[in-house]
Image: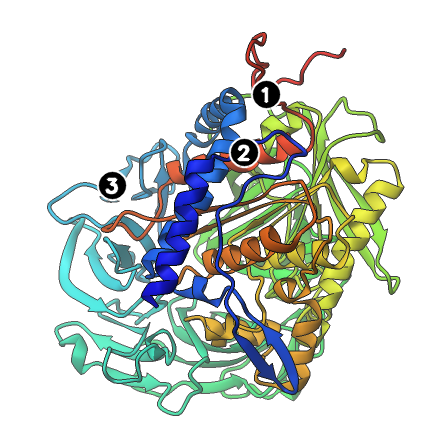
Amino acid sequence: MPNAVAVRVGFIALWVIWGCTCARGERPQYPGTTAGTIVDELHGTSVRDPYRWLENRHDPGVHAWLDAQRELTDQLLAQFAKEREQLHARFEQLFENSVTSTPVVRGDTLFYTQRRGLDALPTLMTRGVEPDSPVRTLISPGRGDAPPRAIAWWVVSPMGDRIAFGATNGANGGGLLHLLDVASATSLALTIPHTRSATVAWNSDGHGFVYTRFPMPGTVSPGAERYHRRVYVHEFGRDWQQDELLWGANAAPTDWPVVWTSVDGNWQFLSIEHDHSRNDLLARPAGTTELFTPVVVEEDALTTANAFGEHLYLRTSVGADRYRIVRVVPGQTASEHWQEIIPEQKGVIADFALANGQLVVHVLENALSRVLIHDLEGALLKEIELPALGAVSELQASPEHPAVYFRFESFASPPVILHYDLRAHTTKPFDQPELNGSMGEYTTRQVWCNSDDGTRVPVFLTHKRDLPANGDYPIVLSAYGAFGVSNTPAFRPEIIPFLNRGGIWAVANVRGGGEFGRSWQMQGRLLNKQNSVTDLLAVAQMLVAEGHTTREKLALYGQDAGALLVGAAITQDPTICGAAVCAEPLLDLLRFSRSPDGAYLQREFGAPADAEQCAALLAYSPLQRVADDVDYPALLLTGALNGDAEGAIHAGKFAARLQAVAATDGPVLLRVTRPKADVEQFTLRDELALHADTWTFLMWQLGLVAPAPTTAPATQPADEAPPSP
């Protein structure tokens, strides 16, 4: 459409000439945007889509329009240049601390990654279990003749002598599987392509493995290479192209296989995820030529597994909404033969590990972690004392090693890797990064809210410790509520300057997540997705009604699925808040299914091709709910034009629609990053620049910063509140 491109670029050129500066409360001069005349008929309903041309990420006219929008955003935020620079400098301090993964235990050896500094990529390292053991570097991205850009994933063999890992280098997106010899720290002569986000189940002897792989281009229809993930078996010395297909010949395109080896190295497991709420579990003895055989299949439930001794141990929601742990004899896997070891309880059994003949169980109670130690018959032996109210993840242990390692963090404390000695019953840090600044001055409390149907929804509030319990404070409220992901306490360094200015960071555990079990998840997906939005609206209303803040000082923040909730909330109740941020959003629910990953997303949100699901989507799809002449909150939409660019596309269409019809004087800003031609991934420094822009916008809209006058006294540092009048 060359004429349309010319018209669009012409509008943009005029906008650049006119300029775009404005004060808070004045309507910005937006770039001109062509509105098309496309109308779709969906199950008898006519739906206009005037900005569909923005879906073409390769269109030069789209690039010009996105660049003009970015220039507008930059010029408006430039009114707060000093604050933005100070925020960016503070974020550099907060993010430059080292980040260490929970170590994987193999015998008396530990394997882990560590990143130090803003420009560094995670390095794969190893050392003995003793604290004074020497550390060796195995993979250091950025060094050597052809280094990977980053380590995407890695799996250690049972003997600890080899590591399979995925590496990104340019635009392959982690799609190359490599092998590393641990003793020499050198790569072996094997590279398997099409292994993006691969999983690996090693044979017990370490001389082969089972792995997941996507189809080679040309073997499926164009665009289907992101689906049809299958399971293959590889033996050393054989060309990978001769690898045998072990599972998936007749599987659905969206079935998602995941493989792993049991902690004792004797079993290989295969989980086939049909959607985010149910899977089939199969197993086979590791390293044999046997096929995978069913363990738990055709159940409307989720099951994971491990093995030790003569038994399989399952964490399952079969007969237990909040999960239970059962013991199974191989070959006798029917549920009537299960022996219940740890029954369903008040909290959700989120994970478990087998260590030194004991079960270490991670339980979520009201979205907060507890770690319990049981014997193999289920008797409770001890509870591990945690540093504070927070979240545990990444349990790692070994049957022969009397310790368990895990990651702990809270809203007010950075992640620390803890080592718990199962014999001495002592806890000490394996790695604890030094933070640039004290976190002791912050605190988190949990409050509750009744949603419209009476469902109790918890909310975490994090703020400075000396802040009175109630008052007229700026609040940024976040939620997620999708895919069964539990939105537990997580340390976010970028909120610290906001907290230091008297702000409150609020996180709502809305339905759709996994915080309260499988039914909580099911109440917020497919035809029930509106419940997630209703919960978020109820929490926002509660924060105002109970005097924590005012609508003008309340902002909503969401990323990907959370951004969908924010978009739905502000289009269903435009008066709910004063500002909002949608990062990498999903906002056009009638078109998302056409994206490269659309078939996967339909499992959570529904299919527009289905009449009933389409009606539900249309009822809350943010783009279609935008109405003319409505005063919507000030809005910042962010995305990146890399990968499938889906978030950037949705952000662009939503921004165009709001800029054209909204009656608001508050800005509707779009910040889409376009990568360099030869770089697919963005760096930590790119992330910090985005944080600086996001929080400058939020502080501007919440009244914490003001445009610098022509002559003005020195601006307060980013971490300090302005003096009282």
Q: CA distance from mark 2 to mark 1?
A: 12 Å
For disc 3, the marked residue is 137
Q: In the depicted view, which residue is nearer to us: 192 or 399? A: 192
- Secondary element under disc 3, as helix, strand or loop, is strand
Q: CA distance from mark 3 to mark 1?
A: 37 Å
Contact (Cβ within 8 Å) of mark 3 with mark 1: no
Mark 2: amino acid: Pro
For disc 1, the marked residue is 719
Q: CA distance from mark 2 to mark 3?
A: 28 Å
For disc 2, the marked residue is 493
Q: Residue at x 21, y 81 (%)?
A: 243
Q: Residue at x 58, y 35 (%)?
A: 697
**Residue 667, percent from left and from top:** 61, 41
Seen in the picture, residue 714 relative to 262 is either above or below; the reply is above
**Residue 94, percent from left and from top:** 48, 28
Disc on the earlier residue, 2 or 1: 2
